[in-house]
Amino acid sequence: MTASFIGNTLIKSITLKLKPLMDIATNSPSLITTTISPRLAKNLRRDIKGRVIEFILMLAALSAVFTTFAIVAILLYESFGFFKTVSLVEFFTGKEWTPLFEDAHYGIMPLVAGTLTTSMVALAVAVPIGTIGAIYLSEFASHKTREITKPILELLVGVPTIAFGYFALLFVTPLLQKIYPDLPGFNMLSAGLVMGVMIVPYIASVAEDAMRAVPMSMREGSYAMGATRFQTALRVVTPAATSGIVAAYILAISRAVGETMVVAVAAGQQPNLTFNPTEGAATITAYIVQVAMGDLPHASIGYQSIFAAGLVLFAMTLGFNIIGHIVRKKYREQY
Amino acid sequence: MMNTTTAIKAESRNLDFFYSNGHRALKSINMPLYENKITALIGPSGCGKSTFLRCFNRMHDLYPGNKYQGQIIMHPDNTNILEAGVDPIEVRMRISMVFQKPNPFPKTIFENVAYGLRVRDEKNKRTIADKVEEALKGAALWNEVKDRLNDLAFNLSGGQQQRLCIARALATDPEIMLFDEPTSALDPIATANIEELMSGLKEKLTILVVTHNMQQAARVSDYTAYMYLGELMEYGDTDTIFTRPTRKETEDYITGKFG
Amino acid sequence: MQASTTPAKASVLSNLNAVRTMIRRHKRNDIIFASIGLIALMLALLTLVTLFVDLVLDGYPKFNLTFFSDFPSRRAGSAGLLSAWVGSLLVMIVTFLTAVPMGVAAGLYLEEYAPKNWFSDLIEINVSNLAGVPSIIYGLLALGLFVYGLDLGQSILTAGLTLGLLILPIVIVSTREAVRGIPVAIREAAYAVGATKWQVVSDHVVKYSQGGILTGVIIGMSRAIGETAPIITIGALTFIAFLPPSPITDVAPYLNFEWLSASFTVLPIQMFNWLSRPEHAFHINAAATGAIIILVTLLMNGTAIWLRYKIRKNIKW
């Protein structure tokens, strides 16, 4: 025991001393074999292999950092070209967005208005339905109902958004036109409504997670006072899970703001400074799609404009995501 | 100490309890709870004392598959609170509970105590304020919190939180109060506070307390029940149980030879 | 004592009657809310069913084999999906080869190797941030970096790489979750018989977490198949009535990589293309394509969910 301990320490100290050497001359086994015994050399080769593998794995992990960096760099670089032509003041305060016209205007406000309007319609649908669904799943549903419902919600999340775009344009809009005949074929209302249904599972599952994180002892405390399920859900569990539920909403806004295909297909592609959902209007994402569909020369102002629009979109979603994660972290720490 | 004229507030008759996995946690328990007295349940962990306590407010109904057999009769109305036709909510409105770990709600001190009243649809602000004050006084917490009733309950110390939970349970004038190891998460000073409180409370109501601390049982209770492996081994007035237990097992447990 | 019982009993009983009335009212609220909750969830499910049925009914005339063997055409009636499904398949190959090795390696690094310091925090923040970046932003990244920066053009390689980066966070997160589920005891057992760290990771950790990783890969791939926005953004919305060169040839070395730089179309792009036409006849094609895409993604997601369910049932560490 003592002998082996001393032996191990010896090997360790030799390895340690040799490490700098190996780092410089990893490809010179002769150096190693001439200085130490074959058994130790084998250990060293193993060690080198382990370090190389670790390095490769680390490079793979760094790809995430690289991707973020590349996104920011590309958006900034191309936008920089754009802002050489367009002043920031015009960009943020201009009320017209017509970069591809002869008489070009570069005010992002109409696109932001379209993005916010469709997102608000979506949230008006998704927040109540998603929250009620989450409360039901977490506090009312039997184990079996939950086991069946949650996978179905996951399936709903997996449906490609282009299919929802079709649904909004060719199913929901005609349906709404029966009730409201003046509704144009492209409108933010049906795009927003469909987007809302799309986001429901997202809110439901994040909010449900938050509610289930509320300790059982708190529910027992409420039931022990003679409360019903509904009273417990409304008066104790929901307040206790507030930060998680709010995080679900914020992350959902980020989703809605970045959603592309539904709005590109169903909300129209005409920039329109309005908050009236019964009108058609382009969102930031729809504008990017519209430009990309055409054949714009590289490095033209139109080409650069989609990066400037993309930068605004990225900043908006990043902001919401960061706030959402901070809020969510808060509830995780709470219990 | 045994007073023959004391009324029985509740009694269990041939009570069996099965968890959803089929485990029989209680075996034919017969035991009275005397009105305005404190009854202590002692025994090694896993003996079923908490299971037994939680039968009294049908807490086991929260988890599917649990099954009661036998009766718990409440007096003076002779209701068998375990009967299928009796709503567990009705039982919980009559019998309140204080848990092992303080479990205040994420609300203000005031709203925590008012919770039971709100659940009972009490709308009158005056009544609620009066009841909250009364309950906080009853739980010996009023002087410490009267100036910060709108603070979050989480900001209180552990001992204060537990007294808040007692106030919460008191505010609705329960007939019986259940204490499930109420001091196991508290320091000795807070423990002494709560024990003193319990002794005062029995003027108004009937108390059943689970404790793993024999000194506590000896200090606060009028009657003591020793449980082991789901069975009621011995029951009697506390002095007798602690000085002249009839069964060897009880004596071994009390003297610390076992458990 | 007898005398005091009767009035006490009467008061308890009258009190009980009031309590019982109140409980009945409360329970009615319970039932009302439970019904609303169930309806809310059903609404989401019902939309999915309506959507699918709508697509199937609208696209019904196109459900035949020639739809899969025809190229797109100016005439809606004879237009088919051949170049689109072949394109999707080839793009998915590139996506798979990008996202799976990189994602699994990154996941393994973060769980097994990374020291807990600012460096691993940085990577972790980036992974969770990337998961929330809108897909169209990946399109802009690809347009600036792959199409023009690296001059890969609007090719299958560009699209595959883009979607690979897009689903990378999904693969990383699912790898980490799967690996985290393996108990320390298994690792210690392997170390105890003299395995190196990499032997422990490759022979044990990866092996036992295969199922969980596979689940994440399937979900990621199904997401990639349905993604439209980033592919449009790289400028791939063109009329493609030919197939890329075959990856397999009949002369040695039997492999050919020209297809990587070929222009292409994929299923969701083809659907969007048809959907943006004003003529109703093309909408039928779009509906049929939509039904096929949904079917494929539902099948993939369903498999993944089933797989995860099975893993949870079988493994009891």
Image (cartoon, coloured by chain):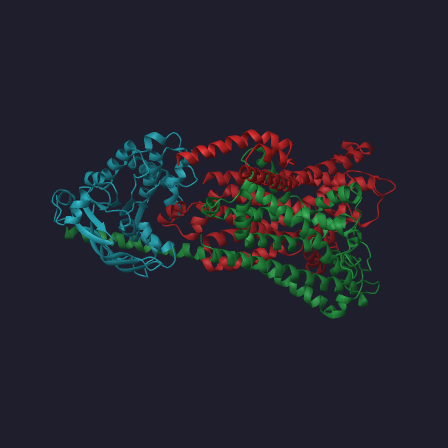
Chain colours: A red, B cyan, C green
Q: Quadrant of the C terminus of chain B?
A: top left
Q: Position of residue C199 (x, y in %)?
A: 54, 46
Q: Position of residue C18 (x, y in %)?
A: 33, 54
Q: Position of residue B50 (x, y in %)?
A: 29, 49
Left or right, residue A116 beside residue A98: left
Q: Residue at x 28, y 35 (%)?
A: B191
The one nearer the camera, A202 or C158, is: C158
Left or right, residue A293 beside residue A251: right
The one nearer the camera, B171 or A192, is: A192
Residue B122 visible from this viewpoint: no
Locate residue B166: give its quadrant.
top left
Vertical order, A311 against A175 (above or below): above
Locate residue C129: give its quadrant.
top right
Query: From this viewpoint, which residue is outermost toward the right?
Result: A102
Q: Residue at x 62, y 45 (%)?
A: C131
Q: Position of residue A174 (x, y in %)?
A: 71, 60
Vertical order, B146 against B92 (above or below): above
Q: Residue at x 68, y 49 (%)?
A: C98
The one nearer the camera, A84 or C215, is: C215
Residue C127 visible from this viewpoint: yes
The one nearer the camera, A21 or C234, is: A21
Q: Quadrant of the N terminus of chain B?
A: top left
Left or right, residue B210 beside residue C226: left
Q: How many marks?
A: 0
